[in-house]
Image: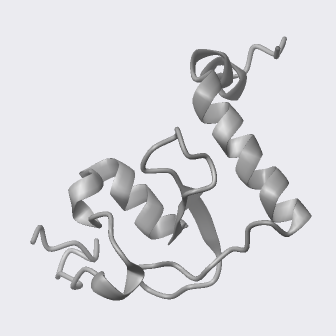
Amino acid sequence: MIESETRQADWRRANPAKYEAHLAVQRALKSGHLEKQACEVCGVGDVDAHHDHYENALHVRWLCRQHHTRLHHYGEDMFPVGAAADLQAPRAVADGTGYDGS
């Protein structure tokens, strides 16, 4: 496995199934079996793959870094699992976070 002592290597050792899912996505993107889509919340093209469930490694949600970070911070109920067409972008609020808690 990984011999490095970095935080990333520690995460990989502690989460082998998640790491394998990430690698599967990278391989599928490189081979053309998977294509990045726009962020399902805001439509931005620079996106991260998010796994709701790691068991199906290639079933991912495409989220921009901002919405991906918010999803991990606020929880899965912020952007419920569903078709992108059913999702709405969170409304901007005065504090600039873009999240109004609803």
Residue at the spot x=55%, y=57% of the render? Answer: 59
| Vertical comparison of 40 with 4: above or below | below
Residue at 52 percent across and 40 percent down: it is 54
Specify the color scheme. Answer: one colour
- From the top left corner, tell me how far across and down residue 22 is, in percent: 68, 44
| Above or below, 1 relative to 11 | above
Which residue is at the front of the view, 25 or 72?
25
> Is residue 88 visible to the viewer in this orientation of the structure?
no
> Viewed as shown, does residue 16 lie left or right of 50?
right
Which residue is at the front of the view, 90 or 87?
A: 87
Asked whether residue 8 is in view, the answer is yes
Q: Examine the rendered structure and indicate whether residue 5 appears above or below residue 57.
A: above
Q: In which quarter of the view is residue 35 placed?
A: bottom right
Indicate the position of residue 92 as horizontal and vertical percent values.
23, 84
Count numbered badges in the picture: 0
The x and y percentages for residue 36 are 68, 74
Quarter of the image with the C terminus in it: bottom left
46 left or right of 54 in image: right
